[in-house]
Amino acid sequence: MKLSQLSVFLENKPGRLSHPCKVLADAGINIVTLSVADTTQFGIMRLIAADWKGAKAALEKAGCVVNVTEVVAMEVADRPGGLQEILEIIERGGMNVEYMYAFTYRAGDKAIIVFRFENADAAVALLRGKGVNLVGSSALPVQS
């Protein structure tokens, strides 16, 4: 139940964000969700693509620096306290969240949130053991 996330390193200058988006559009690859973080000199675009292998190849061919990371996506009750319940499970299990971002895809009355853990396998085991519904590529418009 892990997803492959691409991290694209960008200079923090006008127009740099549109380059990888254009590369993927020209390759016919859909961006399912993304997050952008920045510093004064560079940014990191983290994205989940419908075809992560094709996206990686297209981005690298276009000169982008790309890293692949395993992340875990899970359903979170879309109500006050829903995220807190998940975070309590994670904290009690001794897991550290390196970062997280919301997913634009919804599953009924649940939101989908993507988490990055140091050890994705341990996080999957912990969360499954606590009954958290993890979301794999078969439930989303992405390819493994």
Image (cartoon, rainbow, N blue to C red):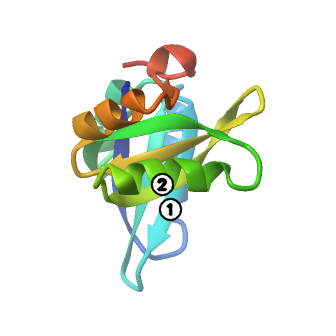
Residue 31 location (% of width, % of height): 55, 37
- Kindly indicate the quadrant of the structure image that contains residue 43: bottom left
Image disc number at residue 90: none
Q: Nearer the viewer, residue 104 or 19?
A: 104
Q: Is residue 82 left or right of residue 30?
A: right
The answer to whether residue 19 of the structure is visible from this angle is no
**Amino acid type of the residue that numbered disc 2 sits on in the rendered structure:** Glu
The residue sitting at the bottom extreme is 40
Circle 2: is it few (<14), some (14-19), or many (20+) Cα within 10 Å? few
Q: CA distance from mark 2 to mark 1?
A: 26 Å
Q: Nearer the viewer, residue 85 or 122?
A: 85
Label 2 sits on residue = 88
Quadrant assignment for the C terminus? top left
Label 1 sits on residue = 36
Q: Nearer the viewer, residue 63 or 74?
A: 74
Image marks 2 and 1: residues in contact by CB distance under 8 Å: no
Which SS class for mark 1?
strand
Residue 7 location (% of width, % of height): 35, 51
Q: Nearer the viewer, residue 70 or 134?
A: 134
Which SS class for mark 2?
helix
Give whichever of discs 2 and 1 has the lower sequence position: 1
Q: Is residue 82 left or right of residue 144?
A: right
